[in-house]
Image: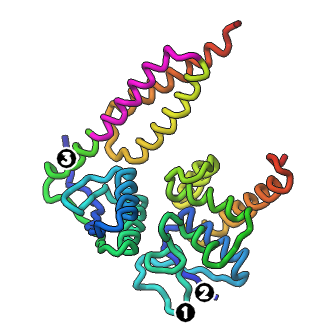
Amino acid sequence: MRWVTRTAVHIDRAGCAWLIRRFIDAEARFVFVADPAETPTDASPFDMRGAELGHHGPDCSFETILRRRELDDPVLWKLAEIVHEADLDDEAFDAPEARGLDVIVRGLSMTCDDARILELTGPIFDGLYEYFRRGMLLGREPA
Amino acid sequence: MPYQAPGEWVLLAYRVPREPSSPRIAIWRKLKRLGVAQVGDGLVALPADARTREHLDWLAEEVVEAGGSAMMWLARPATVAAERELAAGMTAARVAEYGKVLAEAAAGAELEPMARAALLRRLRAELRRIARRDYFPPPQRGEAQAAVAALASRARVESQEPA
């Protein structure tokens, strides 16, 4: 299935793309548009104004996808806190990881195109997921 | 100084229904947090970049979801003087914020170590918050940073002194 989002990918879109490919659509292909009017009709939009899978109320798009797709994995909700803070920085959550992640993706957006950013951030989110999964199983910081 | 044409600004023209008040207040808080310049009634501005455009874009969406209307504009002030006035207003707000941090950091030197460590954490977070909405950094920024750094180095020196 084709998915579409805005170009100049930052943390929320990078996180959503990873979430979609890992948990919703393993065959996902991503298209990036500068103007919402260019959105292909056969692609599902995310993290775009007017899209169901966008910011709603206090939620960033990553959180919206978890809610609308009823993904209740607590590890994903932990990642959602980090993405939320990296994206919105509104101190709704205590997520000290967010600042570093925000800077990493901002830096990548200066040196890479959108497709490459998704290639690079995918393994980062895989690693974060595994880190917090083990942390939750152990009930403490994993080694 | 060489002539510099006015830069690009992103403007949000918006109207939120008076009731219910909670979405209206949430929107107002977010605008305040972003450090917008209030250009007029229901019209705010920020220097345009990818981040400010994105933040205002989502706020526009939130306004619409709250039953209001919103429109984003990209524009340039017609004169350099107008732009300076806009920037000066924003800078004055930041100067006041840095001033508070500076005063608190100076007063913190007298605190006992535990209370001072707590103050240091709070002031560092506050400095980060202010810096995120500081688009035209005034000299007071460096002064506030130096005062907080002094508080931190004092704590370090004391922790190495024999009891």
Q: The disc labelled 1 sits on which kind of residue?
A: Asp
Where A2 falls versus B46 (above or below)?
A: below
Check if mark 3 and mark 1 are on a common chain.
Answer: no
Q: Which residue lies furthest to the bottom in this view?
A: A42
Q: The disc labelled 2 sits on which kind of residue?
A: Arg
Which sits earlier in the primary sequence, circle 2 or circle 1? 2
Chain letter, disc 1 residue: A
Check if mark 3 and mark 2 are on a common chain.
Answer: no
Residue A81 among those drawn in magenta:
no
Chain letter, disc 2 residue: A
- Magenta residues span B93-112
Chain letter, disc 3 residue: B
Disc 3/disc 2 C-alpha distance (Å): 46 Å
Tell me the quarter of the image containing the N terminus of chain A: bottom right
Quadrant in which residue B26 is drawn: bottom left
Secondary element at image label 3: helix
Q: The disc labelled 3 sits on which kind of residue?
A: Arg
Residue assigned mark 2: A2
Q: Do the residues labelled 2 and 1 touch (CB within 8 Å)?
A: yes
Residue A78 lies, in percent from the top left, at 68, 59
Residue B54 lies, in percent from the top left, at 42, 64
**Residue nearer the viewer, B56 or A104:** B56
Residue assigned mark 1: A42
Residue assigned mark 3: B84
Where B47 falls versus B89 (above or below)?
A: below
Secondary element at image label 2: strand
Q: Can residue B53 be seen in this view?
A: no
Quadrant in which residue B144 is drawn: top left
Say which residue appears at 35% left-offset and 51% top-offset: B32
